[in-house]
Image (cartoon, grey):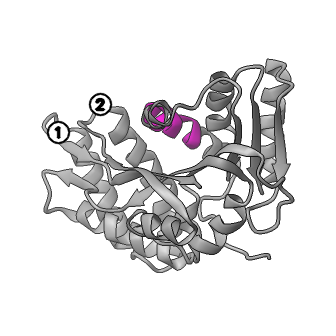
Amino acid sequence: MTQDYEYLLGDGDAELDRLKFQHVVWGPVTERFFDRLGVGSGWKCLDVGAGPGLVSMDIRKRVGETGEVTALEPSAYYREWFQGEIHRLGWKNVRVQEGTSFDAQLPREHFDLVFIRWVIGFVPDPKSFLEPLVSTLKPNGIVAIQDYVHEGCVLFPNGGAWDLFPDAMRKWWRAGGGDPYVGVKLPAVMRELNLKVIDYRPNTLSGGPDSPVMEWIGRFQASQLPVMVEKGLVTQSQADAITRDWRGHQQDPDAVFFSPFVMDVAGRKA
């Protein structure tokens, strides 16, 4: 089965830099998820939509020499970058594979863990995306997903032009066929695929003008507001007002940003 979906953020040097910073901000949240799941030495792991392999590198540190990591990624740019890192680090048990869950040739009943972060929210049909991945799991293997329930994305003091931005983001997400609330639906999808839900919890980060999480949303805003204008999701005057309001909050020592909920969702194969 093949199916196309649009990854709205694209690739390239600027997006790579943004992803590296994003991983600094959210990597500890993912690490705590892996701790709860017990990911460790000897595990065979598949990182789906791995991008430049930032999570794959963290997984490799956990599974060690006796484990195995496969990074599945459609972008040639990211695959080439990660291959360079693998060569630099001298890892022999990490491989990069082209493709998506819809078209990749993957072994059956092979992996202990299939991990998916900020990918399934771009997919029109999460069940059809997950179904071939479940077949790659060993019995008792785990599908672990981190993705949004896009509530709680708030900048205080509120009431200014920036308040338009979260809803514009959600419209932008849906314009590509995705779902910014996919985390709500994933437990039911897992049960339909005969997975036992073993972990389901929200994560949110908050901070003021000097915090990493406020810098994180600011970088996203700077890169994507022009795209939203181009797609007609906000006008140029609205985008300009959002930016002015944002800059005002950056100068306000009492400003606080709350991230949207990032859900940890894990299911175990019988």
Whether 51 is drawn above or below 187: the answer is above
Q: What is the quadrant of the N terminus in the image? A: bottom right
Numbered circle sitting on residue 210: 2
Inter-mark Cα distance, 2 to 1: 10 Å
Percent position (x, y) of residue 107? 84, 53
Numbered circle sitting on residue 252: 1
Residue situated in front as seen by the camera: 270 or 108: 270
Residue at the image point whose x is 33% and y is 41% from the top:
214
**Residue 263 visible from this viewpoint:** yes
Whether 257 is drawn above or below 62: the answer is below
Horizontal side of residue 9 vs 206, given as left or right: right
Pointers 2 and 1 in contact (C-beta within 8 Å): no
Whether 92 is drawn above or below 187: the answer is above
Q: Earlier in the sequence, mark 2 or mark 1?
A: 2
Instruction: Indicate the secondary structure of the residue bearing disc 2.
Output: loop
Residue at the image point whose x is 31% and y is 61% from the top:
242
Kindly identify the amino acid type of the residue bearing the numbered disc 1.
Asp
Percent position (x, y) of residue 162? 26, 60
Percent position (x, y) of residue 252? 17, 39
Which segment is the magenta one? 18-28
